[in-house]
C-alpha cells in the first residue's frame, strides 16, 4: 500500500492461486436487503470461497470499489468495516485496491491470492466412478433468505427464517474445511456451491468425464428453506438443489478414503457433512428419488 | 480457467507483485471517445503500468467485466479483442476473471500479478538528495488528447493531434523500460505518471523524505500538447506537468549511476528519457523557471 502495487512473499514450495469476484448493486445485492457491513462481508466471503474450493490458504486480498457519488460516508465506513472484520477473522491482509466514483451502481470487485502445495490442489477434475459425493452444511438457506427479502416477508421471524436471511446476507466461506481436506489428500475434486449444488455437480462431472447419481432423500435441506418451500408450494429438495449462494463445499471422495475424509472434516471444526450420492461411469447427472431417475435440474441466476 | 481459481507457478527467488485498477464508463472513458478495442487495451495498459513502475514482470492478468444489458455483442467482442491483443503483445496470459451484468455503466476491473527479485524491486521510497530525476517520453499528450475529445475538436487533424488522441485512447505501459532499469539496479525510485508528473514527483519526495527541484525548461512537452495549450491560452509546461494518463515513468538516479542508467534505457529500446531535475534536502517540491521558484502544481482528476 502506498506504492503502485503490493508485494507478497510467496509460500515456499507452493503455487499461487488467484481469483476475482464482483458484487454489483441491483444484480447481486440491494441496499434495502443488506447493510453496508453485510455487503462488505459478503464481497470478501464469496471471493475467498473460491480459494477454499481449491484448498488454498489466502495470503492477501485486493478491494476495488466503485462508489456512487451520493453514497453516505457512514455507508462507506460500513462497507470497509464489514470487509475488514471478516479479513481480520480470516487473518488475510488487505494488500491493495482501488477506489473510484460510479455514475451508477455500487460495485465491489475483490481479488484474492492464496497458496497451495501443487500436489494438494483441489480442482473440479479427477472424480472417478465409485467416488462418493459429500456436501457440507444444509442447502437452500441463502436462496430462501433471498426469496424472503424479495417477498418482504417480515412476518416469518422464527429462527429458521432469520438463519436463511443471514445465510444470504453474510455467507460463510468454508475455508478451514477446504484447506484441511486438501492437506489430507482425501478428496479427488472440490467445488463451492456459489451457483447451487446442481450446477456444481454438473461441473465436476463434466470436468472429470463421469456422471453422478444424487440421492434425493440424502440431500440436507436447511430447515428454514424446507419451511419456506413448503409454505410456497415448492418442492424442498428441488429448491435446495437449485438454490445458489450457499457457499458450502461439495467433495468427491474415493470409498477407501472415506474414513480419513471424515476424520479431516472432524478436525476442521466438525462441520456437518452428508454423503449425497456417487460418481458414475454413465455421463448423466441424475437425481434419484423414490426409485425414479430424472436429470438433476437447476441453474442458478441472481434476482 | 474452468476451475474456481487460477493457478500460477511462482518465479523462483521472486516476490509476487499485485495490483488492481478499474475503468468506469463516464468516469474514465466515454464510449463516444474510445472504441471498444481502445477501452479493452487501455484497461490492461493502465494496470500493467503499475507493475512496470515496480520493475515487475507480469505473469498473469484477471479481467472482471460489468456489462450493461444493452451492450452490443460486437462491442463485447471489441473489448475482449483490444484486451487480448495487448496481452498477447506483452506475452501475459489472461488467467481468470468474472463477467456480470451492470444496471449502469460499463466497468472493467483488471488485476495483474507479476514477479520481481526482492533486491530489484522499485518503490517510491529511496530517493536521496542529489539524485537526478529522469522521465521517459514526452508529457501532456494524453491530457491534450482528452481535451480535444471533450471539445470535439474534429478540425485539429495534424499528426500532433492524432498522436495526442491516441495517447489518451491507447496508452502504452513502459513495461520493458521498468523491468530493465530495475534489473540493472540503477534507479533509487520509480513511479508511473498515471496522475501526472507533479503528482508522481510529490509522492516520491514524500515517501523518500526529500524534496525536488524540477527545471521547467527541461520538461519534455509533447508537440501536440504544446500546440493545444498554446491555442487555448494555457501554459504548455503547466499543462504537461499537471496532465494525467501519460503512463510514462519517472526515475530517480544517483549521479554515479547516471551512465549505467542511460545504458539500461538504451537497451530497453532506446525510449526517449530526459533529465528534468534533482532531489533536494529541503522537503519542498519546486518548479524552477527563469530563476523563479514556485510549488510544483497539479493534481490530476478525470473529466
Image (cartoon, coloured by chain):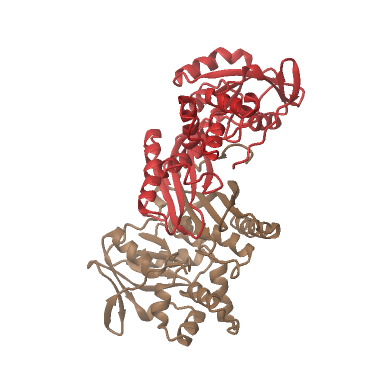
Chain colours: A brown, B red
Looking at the image, the residue that sits furthest to the left is A282
Residue B52 pos. (x, y %): 51, 32
Q: Position of residue B280 (x, y in %)?
A: 72, 21
Visible residue check, residue B172: no
Where, quadrant-wise, is the C terminus of chain B in this rendering? Answer: top right
Q: In this image, A202 relative to A55: left or right? A: left
Q: Residue shown at 26%/63% (left/top)? A: A210
Q: Residue at x 41, y 66 (%)?
A: A250
Vertical order, B55 against B150 (above or below): above
Side (left or right) of B182 relative to A75: left
Q: Residue at x 43, y 51 (%)?
A: B97
Q: Name the one closer to the observer, A241 or B283.
A: B283
| Res B216 → quadrant | top right
Instruction: Report the residue that reaches farthest toward the right.
Output: B282
Residue A255 drawn above or below residue B95? below
Measuring from the top left, give residue A259's x and y in whole percent: 40, 67
User: Visible in this render: residue B283?
Assistant: yes
The quadrant in which residue B124 appears is top right
**Is B184 in front, or is B49?**
B49
Front one among B42 and A296: B42
x 26%, y 60%: residue: A209
Q: How many marks?
A: 0
- In the picture provided, is A81 more to the left or to the right than A230? right
Amino acid at each position: 500500500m502506498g506504492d503502485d502495487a503490493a508485494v507478497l512473499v510467496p509460500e515456499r514450495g507452493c503455487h499461487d492461486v488467484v481469483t476475482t469476484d464482483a458484487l454489483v448493486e441491483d444484480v447481486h445485492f440491494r441496499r434495502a436487503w443488506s447493510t453496508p457491513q453485510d455487503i462488505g462481508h459478503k464481497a470478501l466471503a464469496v471471493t475467498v470461497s473460491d480459494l477454499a474450493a481449491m484448498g488454498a490458504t489466502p495470503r492477501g486480498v485486493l478491494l476495488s470499489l466503485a462508489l456512487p457519488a451520493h453514497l453516505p460516508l457512514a455507508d462507506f465506513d460500513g462497507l470497509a468495516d464489514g470487509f475488514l472484520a471478516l479479513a481480520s477473522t480470516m487473518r488475510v491482509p488487505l494488500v491493495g485496491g482501488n477506489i473510484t466514483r460510479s455514475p451508477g451502481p455500487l460495485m465491489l470487485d475483490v481479488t484474492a491470492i492464496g497458496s497451495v502445495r501443487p500436489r494438494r490442489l483441489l480442482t473440479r477434475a479427477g472424480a472417478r466412478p465409485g467416488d462418493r459425493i459429500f456436501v457440507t452444511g444444509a442447502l437452500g438457506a441463502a436462496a430462501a433468505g433471498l426469496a424472503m427479502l424479495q417477498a418482504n416477508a417480515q412476518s416469518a421471524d422464527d429462527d429458521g427464517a432469520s438463519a436463511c436471511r443471514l445465510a444470504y446476507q453474510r455467507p460463510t466461506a468454508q475455508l478451514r474445511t477446504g484447506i484441511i481436506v486438501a492437506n489430507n489428500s482425501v478428496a479427488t475434486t472440490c467445488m463451492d456451491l456459489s451457483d447451487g449444488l446442481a450446477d456444481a455437480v454438473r461441473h465436476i462431472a463434466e470436468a472429470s468425464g463421469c456422471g453422478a447419481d444424487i440421492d434425493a432423500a440424502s440431500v440436507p435441506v436447511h430447515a428454514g428453506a424446507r419451511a419456506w418451500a413448503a409454505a410456497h408450494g415448492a418442492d424442498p429438495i428441488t429448491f435446495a438443489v437449485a438454490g445458489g449462494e450457499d457457499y458450502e463445499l461439495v467433495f468427491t471422495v474415493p470409498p477407501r478414503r472415506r474414513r480419513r475424509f471424515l476424520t479431516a472434516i472432524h478436525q476442521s471444526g466438525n462441520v456437518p457433512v452428508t454423503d449425497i450420492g456417487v460418481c458414475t461411469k454413465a455421463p448423466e447427472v441424475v437425481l434419484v428419488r423414490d426409485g425414479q431417475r430424472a436429470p438433476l435440474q437447476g441453474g442458478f441466476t441472481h434476482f
